[in-house]
Image (cartoon, rainbow, N blue to C red):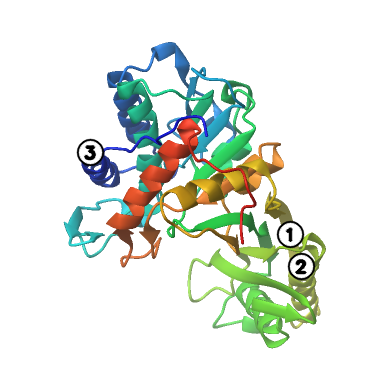
Amino acid sequence: MICPVPPEPDSKRALALVMKLMAIPGKTGQEGRIVRFVTQQLVRAGAEGGRISTDRAFERSPIGGQSGNLKLRLPGTIRGPRRMLMAHLDTVPLCVGCKPVRRGGLVRSANPSTALGADNRSGVAVVLTAALEILRRKLPHPPVTFFFPVQEEIGLVGVRNASLGPLGRPALAFNFDSGDTNGLILGATGAYRMTIEVAGIASHAGVHPRDGVSAITIAAMAIASLEADGWHGLITKGKKKGTSNVGIINGGDATNVVTPHVTVRAEARSHDPQFRKRIVNEISRRFQQAARNLKNNAGHHGSVEIDSALDYESFELRPAHPCVRAAAAAVRTIGGVPHPVIVDGGLDANWITARGIPTVTLGAGQHHAHTVNEILNVEEFQQGCRLALRLATGTEGDDGPAFG
């Protein structure tokens, strides 16, 4: 143990901070205001301006954006490998207009039509609190980087395009983007995103309906085929498992025109890369088959063009990895019982791990994300703040096995 007594964060100040953070709008691509707020907090606490930076990751985003990833890199006051604490800044659009209010041990949005934004402003507050405590109190710490990525919610765009050099080559990384502070997320699924352009043949829907080929019907036939054969939704084929979803369909201009074009967006997920590719291939095959099978009076049929790309790769950390052992030790020092978790969603940890920085994800009290029922559990949030400060200062203690 580096310090005999782990430092404790100011829990009241941390709670006030997260309430402010959740009230600041900052959906994906519009994180400029939240970046400025976090930067101001760091500067006021004593961070040197030259140690704070943003990159140009948004320039490589499909939606552009207002800001890149925000970083604070501090040299160590004690020896040790560099650590990194991170939490993404953006929220889903449903959070815009949030009015956080505390009732007992929970925080909700007083605006019933919005989500709370605890995903992931609770994580931001946890990481920011650790940085502010170190700066204000001049706490001893190993080399540490505080990293606030943008555009996580649309496919981990910020970390995928981050400039890694300014991070300082951290050996241990901790991502705060979950709820339960006892659960350590060691692995997550991988995902492909697909854009399917379906071309039919236009005709007058009332006068000559059979001269046309409906792109909507092609898409419907393909989706129905996937559903009927167990390739849509939860997929189980023998010992192989995954999921798929057709989430967006756009097309058509009028009810009296046989629709000549629709755009379909879908995804396929699995922890098994080969099975995930098989799901992608099944989706492609069903759309191509539906396009060939639907013909007009002249025997002509439609066509499809399919673009699929890896959104993020699956990963799973070993329990013996130093970042997992450190996180587990930190949980024990606050009275918790750590346990490993593998999730079916994507995390910034997917891409940051794939890029050479193994990362474990920890809890910050958020629950029911992306819904109007979202809550922040105050006790779990405060425990998350304690975890983050221990990990940032290297005061997590024992170096034994992570679990058991």
Q: Amino acid at mark 3?
A: Arg
Residue 284 image label:
2
Crowding around mark 3 (Cα neighbors within 10 Å: few <14, some 14 to 19, many 20+) is few
* Residue position for label 1: 306
Q: From the viewer's perspective, tell me whether residue 75 is left or right of residue 66.
A: right
Q: Amino acid at mark 2?
A: Ser
Depth order, front residue of 308/371: 371
Mark 3 or 1, closer to the camera: 3
Q: Dot 3: what SS?
A: helix
Q: From the viewer's perspective, tell me whether residue 141 is left or right of residue 217.
A: left
Q: Dot 1: what SS?
A: strand
Mark 2 or mark 3: whose residue is earlier in sequence: 3
Residue 13 image label:
3
Evaluate if marks 2 and 3 touch, with contact meaning CB atoms under 8 Å apart. Answer: no
Crowding around mark 1 (Cα neighbors within 10 Å: few <14, some 14 to 19, many 20+) is some
The alpha-carbon separation of the residues under discs 3 and 1 comes to: 51 Å
